[in-house]
Image (tube, helix red, strand yellow):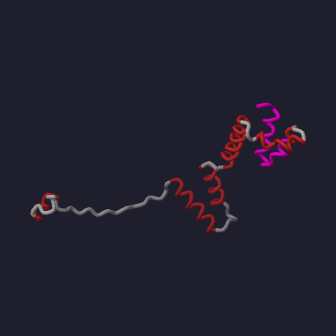
């Protein structure tokens, strides 16, 4: 991939417009209008566009730590509505595992399958 193709890919990721991206990258207006779409079919250009797009998406996704920092800021903000502060604290507690769910289970013993079958006289076992 040459320098112009690289610039095209970078402009294309920003704008999504093939013609404008080609012109900004240094291609002629005639080429851009007639054949800029062909640049998207170039394997190197397409791969670079995909890499740039994935990188941009990764940078936009908040990490767990960033979410915790933001929620902590909300929880500490004395100017925020009390309900918002409580919701932020609740969400933080859930994220960090502060809440413990208690589960009660009752286990009862039952007869053995062999005892049940004996009571039934072995019925249903023969085909």
Which residue appears at 44% of the width and 58% of the height?
Answer: 100
Quadrant of the image containing the C terminus: bottom left
Q: Say if 52 sits above or below 89 in the image.
A: above
Left/right of residue 111 with respect to residue 43 in the rendered view: left
Quadrant of the image containing the N terminus: top right
The x, y position of residue 104, in whole percent, is 34, 63
Q: Say if 83 sits above or below 55 in the image.
A: below
Question: Which residue is at the far front?
Answer: 34
Q: Say if 51 sits above or below 79 in the image.
A: above
77 in the magenta segment: no
Q: Main secondary structure of the magenta part?
A: helix
The x, y position of residue 45, in whole percent, is 74, 37
Question: Which residue is at the far top?
Answer: 2
Q: Which corner quadrant of the image does residue 105 belong to?
A: bottom left
Tally of numbered discs: 0
Q: Say if 42 sits above or below 16 in the image.
A: above
Q: Which corner quadrant of the image does residue 21 belong to?
A: top right
Q: Which residues are magenta?
A: 1-22
Which residue appears at 26% of the width and 62% of the height?
Answer: 107
9 in the magenta segment: yes
The x, y position of residue 17, in whole percent, is 80, 48
Seen from the viewer's position, the closer of residues 84 and 41 is 41
Left/right of residue 78 with respect to residue 18 in the rendered view: left
Question: Which residue is at the far right?
Answer: 29
The x, y position of residue 85, in whole percent, is 62, 64
């Amino acid at each position: 991939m040459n320098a112009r193709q690289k610039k095209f890919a970078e402009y294309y990721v920003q704008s999504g417009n093939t013609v404008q991206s080609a012109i900004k990258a240094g291609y002629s207006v005639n080429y851009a209008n007639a054949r800029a779409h062909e640049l998207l079919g170039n394997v190197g250009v397409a791969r670079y566009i995909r890499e740039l797009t994935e990188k941009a998406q990764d940078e936009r996704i908040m990490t767990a730590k960033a979410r915790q920092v933001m929620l902590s800021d909300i929880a500490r903000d004395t100017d925020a509505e009390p309900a918002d502060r409580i919701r932020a604290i609740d969400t933080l507690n859930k994220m960090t595992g502060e809440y413990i769910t208690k589960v009660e289970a009752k286990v009862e013993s039952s007869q053995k399958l062999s005892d049940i079958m004996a009571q039934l006289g072995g019925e249903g076992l023969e085909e």
